[in-house]
Amino acid sequence: MLSTEALRAHLLASRLAGDVATSRETSLRSYRAFVARDPRVTLGLDPRWAWSVRDVIALMADRCGVSADPEHVTGADVIDPERTLGRLAAFAERLGAVAAQGGAVLFGTGHPHRLLGFYADLADALSAAGCSVLTPAQGRCVDITTRFGVRTYRLEYVRGVARLREAGAGGAGAHSHSPLPVRVALGAAADAGGRLPDLVVGDHGWVCGAGQLGIEAIGLADTDDPALFVGEAEGQVSVAVPLDDAVRSDYYRPLTRYVLNRACLSQ
C-alpha cells in the first residue's frame, strides 16, 4: 500500500502539487473569464451565486492553496499537497460507496493524452467489483465550437473511458473542455431506456456538465479550472481534486494505487 507520506512526496516531486506548471497569469485569466460566464471556462456549469474575481480567487485559495492576494499576478501557481490528499480521500470514498452498491459509473476525460490511463484503471477496478461501467453513445458525432470554428468529433470509449477524437484523425484523442459529450452520452442512455449513471468520474465538462444535470460527479481539476471548485462549493459537484492535470501520464499511477486502496478496490 502506498502511504500518505510517500504519495505526498510523489505529488511534490512530480509537480502534481506544490509549484505546478500552470502560471498565475493563466489562472487569473480563467477566473476573469469565469466571472464573465465564458462557456469555455464555465464548462457547462450555470453558477447559482454571483461571483466576483476576488470571490473566485478566495475560493481557489481555500480549495487549492493558490495565493489569496489579488495583487499577486505573476509566477507559478501553487497547489497545497495536503488539499490534494484530502480531496483524493473524498474521491476514493465516493468510488468505494458506489462500488458497495454495485452502481453504474460513467467515465470521461477531456485530457486523454494524460489522464485516460488513470480513469481506465479505476474503471477496471469498479467493473471487477460488480459495477456497470457505462458506454452510451459510442461512435456518436459531436459538433463543438472551437476557436477554429465548428469541428466534428467522434465520441469513443477506450477501456471504458469516453474521449473525443476529431473525425478522420488518429492519435490519442482530443483535448476538450466542452460539456456537450456528457450531454450526448446521457441523452443517448435516456433515449435508449438504459441505465443512467449513479456517478460520473472525469474532468472539465464531463464533471460540470453532469453535475449541472443533477448527476453526482467527481473529478480532477487544475488551478485554471475554477468551474469544478465553484460547482463543489455550490453543491453541483461532489468532489473536485486539485492537482496539475497535464503532467506525464505515468505520474498519475501512484494516485491510482492510493485511491483504489482507500476505496478498498485494490485488485
Image (tube, rainbow, N blue to C red):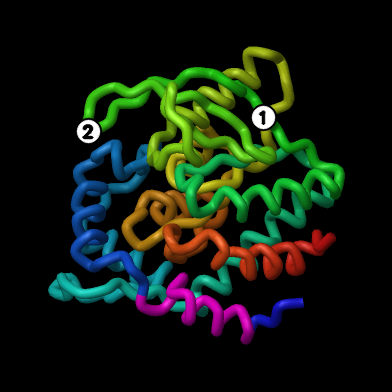
Side (left or right) of 73 relative to 209: left
Q: Position of residue 151 (x, y in %)?
A: 33, 23
Q: Which residue is mark 2?
A: 147
Side (left or right) of 237 relative to 259: left
Q: Position of residue 186 (x, y in %)?
A: 58, 26
The mark that comes first in sequence, 2 or 1, is 1
The answer to which quarter of the image holds residue 61 is bottom left
Residue at the (63%, 65%) spot, across then down: 253
Q: Which residue is mark 1?
A: 135
Q: Nearer the viewer, residue 203 or 174?
A: 174
Screen quadrant of the C terminus? bottom right
- Find residue 47 and name its label: none
Q: Position of residue 105 (x, y in %)?
A: 69, 40
Q: Is 190 inside the magenta-drawn segment? A: no
Q: Is 12 inside the magenta-drawn segment? A: yes
- Is residue 64 placed above or below 235 in the rendered structure? below
Residue at the (55%, 67%) spot, across then down: 251
Contact (CB < 8 A) between labels 2 and 1? no
The answer to which quarter of the image holds residue 69 is bottom left
The answer to which quarter of the image holds residue 24 is bottom left
Mark 2 crowdedness (10 Å alpha carbons): few <14, some 14-19, many ≥20: few
**CA distance for labels 2 and 1:** 29 Å
Residue type (three-letter) at the residue carrying disc 2: Arg
Q: Nearer the viewer, residue 266 or 159?
A: 159
Residue type (three-letter) at the residue carrying disc 1: Thr
Start-end of magenta stretch:
5-19
